Image: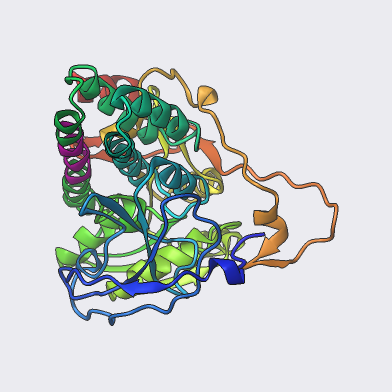
Amino acid sequence: MPLQITANERHAAIVFKEKTLAGFKPKYVKGAGRIGNPASVESGGSQVKGKLMAESFYTLKWEKKALFLLDQRVLPRVEVVRRLTEPVGVADAIITMVVRGAPAIGVTAAFGLVLAVQVARRKKRPWRGAFDEAATLLAATRPTAVNLFWAIERMRNVASGLPDDPSKALLRLEQEAVAIMEEDVAANRAMGVRGAKLLPKAACVLTHCNAGALATAGYGTALGVLRAAVAAGKKIHVFVDETRPFLQGARLTAWELMKDRIPCTLITDNMSATLFAAGKIDAVVVGADRIAANGDVANKVGTYGVAVLCKEHKVPFYVAAPLSTIDRKLRTGAAIPIEERDSSEVTHLMGKRVAPEGVDVYNPAFDVTPARYISAIITEKGVIRPPFSGSIRKLFG
């Protein structure tokens, strides 16, 4: 059952002593194996006023040979950081959505592979076998986010040319994982600058799910565009879909925007049509988990409906995603695998049952928006418009 806390899972919380950029000092919970349910630990630090939220917390951090993840399952109620030292813990963190968002999942998986080699060296096991086992484990966590497979393949390519010496292999793989993380942040900032130019000087923008710093290594994709627009002096008000059933909009996007002091209004998913009909939405910006070669976009379930509303009301629908989210191997979105998650996410709300026992549940995590509904795709290399098949080929040319 989601978000339940047992006595055995109330681990000791230790204040993380590393000073972050804005002085935010979260708590963290040790744990190298399965994550289990979130511990109840109150947040430390305070809200930072007048600064971009990207400086007030981190989604993930690599330090002292351990991966630290902000546990997104319990936000905004509490702020807890998990310390992971083994790949099984990383895989479980992805499955249970301690970390989520396609770019963040990819970066996390890269460090999971580093941890696999680190553990193998400590146990005096051949590192290649441990690496391959971890790669298989991590690839089986979530099927839709292509960044996961992109990061694993990139790490595999590096690993194939490394010596048998585990120390040398570990050093090089760690460098590659850090590079993936840093490149993600740089790509997000570049997307933000490009995407901000598409928005009017004053605009009400709707977003669905969470495509912010929490979904990436930092700054965000869709929210990165909004952050950059605000930084450029534009007056942006954000309407935030709550995003059932996991409430990423209500719990995460609203939390990020309020940390940044960006004006926002939370709505339930079924209220957006009313806002479109009233002429209150000027643009929509969302992220993506996978983009097919023709421009079809898989994103959090409910995105397709928003895109249809945009088409009907002549409102631009923008997708912000790095090149690592584009899967040129898939001709159309019909080939994108769609993850189905546990029924309890629908039948329960914050750990309490809200639906009758025994009811059938359909719970796809994503839907596919056909390219014909998309006004533009914002990437770190440029903004592309329909027809997307040709413009995507040019991006990689």
Residue 303 is situated, as x and y percent measured from the top left of the image, at 51, 47
Identify the image quadrant of the C terminus. top left
Residue 139 quadrant: top left
Q: Is 272 contained in the magenta span?
A: no
Q: How is the image coloured?
A: rainbow
Q: Is residue 280 visible?
A: no
In the image, taking residue 15 as reference, residue 92 lies left or right, namely: right
Q: State yes or no: residue 174 in magenta.
A: yes
The image position of residue 245, as x and y in percent, is 61, 56
- Direction from residue 305 to residue 376 in the image, left or right: left
In this rendering, would 69 be left or right of 229? right
Is residue 123 in view from this perspective?
yes
Q: In this rendering, is residue 111 above or below 130?
A: below
Q: Position of residue 334 (x, y in %)?
A: 54, 24
Q: Work out whether residue 123 or residue 1 is closer to the camera in this orientation and state it.
A: 123
Task: Tell me what residue is drawn at x 84 percent, y 58 percent.
Answer: 357
Quarter in which the N terminus is drawn: bottom right
245 above or below 50?
above
Give the mark count: 0
Most foreground residue, 352 or 189: 352
Q: Position of residue 371 (x, y in %)?
A: 43, 31
Q: Residue at x 45, y 42 (%)?
A: 88
Q: Main secondary structure of the magenta part?
A: helix
Q: Quadrant of residue 376?
A: top left
- The residues colored magenta run 172-182
